[in-house]
Image: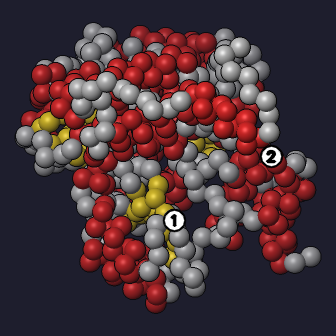
């Protein structure tokens, strides 16, 4: 047996040869060998007793898995909108100049690979990149020159980080240059936190009372969809048998990064929320699905879990109340669609992150087809404080329909980008004053899948009943080319991230991207605007999951709110086609030697 085969077998044994842990196995293989080769696929398939196709289809789905080896240093630069705003072009140019290869290539000595990736959750400190999963922020030409020189010296990537960020970013298990940039702490998620207080209170109540408390608080899911959390917990509690609590820490919406800050500063509050949910619905097992881009926090999070176990806040007989609950961390490998709850479940089971058809809903058949609840990081942090302080305390903040506070990740053209915990009901104008933004052309509310609003709408309120958001807020200055710098970037993002199951999502996002290019390049005519609206409606109505249903929003909402921009770039002309269908049929029949049948 070769050494490679021996290592591969050891990796599969680490996960008890469980095909449900295929993601973890592939992550370990990619990390150890720099790729998941044909040989690796064959050994993994045979050890897990699954087909090679099963392994290949998972490998091919995720951005950070590769069949061919990446360089010793794998550079993934974030090509999001804010990265573009603040100098990505220069950084890309310098990486290419210094390494001698283009993005998408590896140096001939196998030292450096350059790749693009979607938003890595650092929109307040762009341009940013991952190098072998270590985060580098605020890049510029000088920093790139230094990084490439250090790669040539063979330096360890972690040692290239010389300055650390704030808060727990300096923790020995994190040691990251990432900054929290907490600009405003509210009372719920970033306010004072007493470890164990929420849990203690929950265990003094019945599970039904815990659910009622969350229901009464009007807490709604903070991932964006806004489904009432208490209701979700109640539906799951009504099911019987083994159940699971899943935490969605896969914030992939470009422009959002507030869950990264909560994971860094309020991890225990979030884990407590998961345990409280477990108690309420009757589950003993929790899984946190951590996006691969936040791998640098994994050891720290594992340490928080270990400390909680030592303090009897997790594990068996928690706080001597007879309740058992534990949590494992499931890493992703780069796929925006895995933020969709059923895709997240599929991925957690080791499969491609393709959304499931619904019903059945996850509360009925979720992880391993068992009843499961999925809430995001901010929702669990909020639930802990709601149980500690009561529903009325929570409802005293926010608006009638949107109770409590909301964490906003604010980036783009403003003086103070960062995380703000505000009460629902803040107007966009108040938000712009708060972050020091002037000369604003537009605000992208809720990321690419949200809505792009114009100054005439800045008196709208950030609230479920007016402007709902999962937290991403990108300020777009008047100096930006809205179509080229923003809409086109977003549409390319959706084109890349569609899982490909639905024809409309797979094709129309590509078509809409090409249409936007026509508009930008001055090749479009007025009827193209109408076509884009029609096609946007089709993809919205006919796509299976939230990704497709919202993917046309960058086009749809900018045509709606910035119509004059489209009008000014399109020609008032009729469409004339020189294409002759009969001639084309004759030519193709001739080419294949078939008798033409015209106008039957
Ligand atoms: Fe996949 Fe798009 Fe269909 Fe969602 S809408 S299932 S991402 S193809």
The relative height of residue 195 versus residue 102 in the rendered view (above or below) is above
Foreground residue among 195 and 354: 354
Q: Which residue sits at x=68%, y=21%?
A: 598
Left or right of 169: which side holds 397? left
Q: Residue 425's spot in the image, x, y percent? A: 21, 20
Location of residue 352 by image quarter: top right
Q: Residue 308's spot in the image, x, y percent? A: 54, 47
For disc 1, the marked residue is 104
Q: Which residue sits at x=46%, y=87%?
A: 152
Q: Callout 1 environment at 10 Å: few (<14), some (14 to 19), or many (20+)?
A: few
Q: Tag 2's secondary structure? A: helix
Q: How is the image coloured?
A: secondary structure
The relative height of residue 292 versus residue 354 in the rendered view (above or below) is below
Left or right of 171: which side holds 467? left
Spatial CA span between label 1 and label 2? 26 Å
Left or right of 150: which side holds 462? left
For disc 2, the marked residue is 54
Residue 119 visible to the viewer: yes
Q: Quadrant of the C terminus?
A: top right
Q: Tag 1's secondary structure? A: loop
Location of residue 165 by image quarter: bottom left
Q: Residue 239's spot in the image, x, y percent? A: 70, 14
Residue 222 visible to the viewer: no
């Amino acid at each position: 047996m070769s050494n490679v085969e021996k290592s591969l077998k050891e990796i599969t044994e680490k996960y008890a040869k469980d095909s449900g842990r295929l993601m973890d196995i592939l992550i370990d293989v990619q990390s150890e060998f720099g790729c998941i080769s044909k040989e690796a696929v064959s050994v993994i398939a045979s050890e897990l007793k699954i087909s090679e196709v099963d392994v290949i289809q998972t490998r091919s789905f995720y951005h950070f898995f590769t069949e061919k080896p990446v360089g010793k240093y794998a550079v993934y630069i974030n090509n999001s909108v804010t990265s573009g705003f603040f100098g990505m072009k220069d950084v890309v140019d310098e990486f290419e100049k210094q390494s001698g290869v283009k993005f998408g290539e590896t140096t001939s000595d196998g030292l450096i690979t350059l790749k693009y990736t979607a938003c890595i959750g650092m929109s307040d400190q762009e341009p940013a990149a991952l190098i072998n999963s270590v985060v580098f922020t605020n890049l510029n030409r000088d920093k790139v020159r230094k990084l490439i020189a250090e790669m040539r010296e063979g330096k360890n990537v972690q040692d290239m980080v010389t300055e650390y960020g704030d808060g727990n970013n300096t923790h020995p298990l994190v040691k990251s240059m990432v900054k929290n940039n907490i600009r405003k702490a509210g009372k719920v998620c970033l306010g004072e936190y007493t470890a164990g207080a929420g849990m203690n209170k929950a265990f003094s109540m019945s599970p039904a009372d815990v659910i009622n408390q969350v229901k009464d608080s009007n807490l709604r899911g903070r991932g964006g969809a806004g489904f009432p959390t208490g209701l979700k917990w109640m539906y799951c509690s009504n099911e019987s048998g083994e159940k699971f609590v899943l935490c969605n820490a896969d914030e992939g919406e470009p422009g959002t990064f507030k869950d990264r800050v909560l994971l860094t500063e309020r991890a225990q509050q979030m884990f407590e929320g998961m345990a409280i949910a477990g108690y309420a619905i009757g589950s003993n097992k929790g899984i946190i699905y951590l996006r691969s881009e936040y791998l640098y926090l994994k050891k720290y999070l594992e340490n928080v879990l270990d400390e909680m176990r030592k303090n009897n806040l997790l594990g068996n007989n928690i706080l001597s109340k007879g309740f058992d609950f534990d949590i494992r961390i499931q890493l992703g490998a780069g796929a925006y669609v895995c933020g969709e709850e059923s895709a997240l479940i599929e991925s957690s089971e080791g499969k491609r992150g393709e959304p499931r058809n619904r019903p059945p809903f996850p509360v009925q058949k979720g992880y391993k087809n068992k009843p499961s609840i999925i809430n995001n990081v901010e929702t669990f942090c909020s639930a802990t404080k709601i149980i500690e302080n009561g529903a009325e305390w929570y409802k005293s903040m926010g608006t009638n329909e949107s109770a409590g506070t909301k964490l906003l990740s604010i980036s783009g053209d403003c003086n103070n980008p960062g995380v703000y915990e505000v009460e629902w009901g803040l107007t966009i104008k108040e938000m712009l004053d708060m972050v020091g933004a002037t000369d604003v052309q537009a605000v992208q509310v809720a990321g690419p899948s949200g809505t792009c609003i114009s100054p005439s709408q800045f008196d709208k309120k950030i609230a479920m009943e007016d402007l709902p958001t999962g937290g991403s807020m990108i300020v777009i200055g008047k100096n930006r080319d809205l179509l080229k710098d923003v809409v086109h970037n977003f549409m390319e993002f959706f084109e890349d991230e569609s899982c490909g199951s639905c024809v409309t999502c797979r094709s129309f996002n590509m078509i809409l991207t090409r249409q936007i290019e026509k508009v930008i390049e001055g090749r479009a005519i007025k009827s193209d605007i109408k076509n884009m609206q029609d096609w946007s409606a089709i993809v919205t109505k006919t796509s299976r999951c939230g990704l497709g249903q919202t993917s046309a929003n960058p086009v749809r909402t900018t045509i709606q709110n910035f119509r004059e921009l489209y009008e000014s770039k399109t020609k008032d002309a009729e469409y004339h086609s020189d294409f002759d269908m009969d001639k084309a049929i004759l030519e193709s029949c001739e080419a294949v030697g078939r008798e033409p049948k015209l106008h039957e």
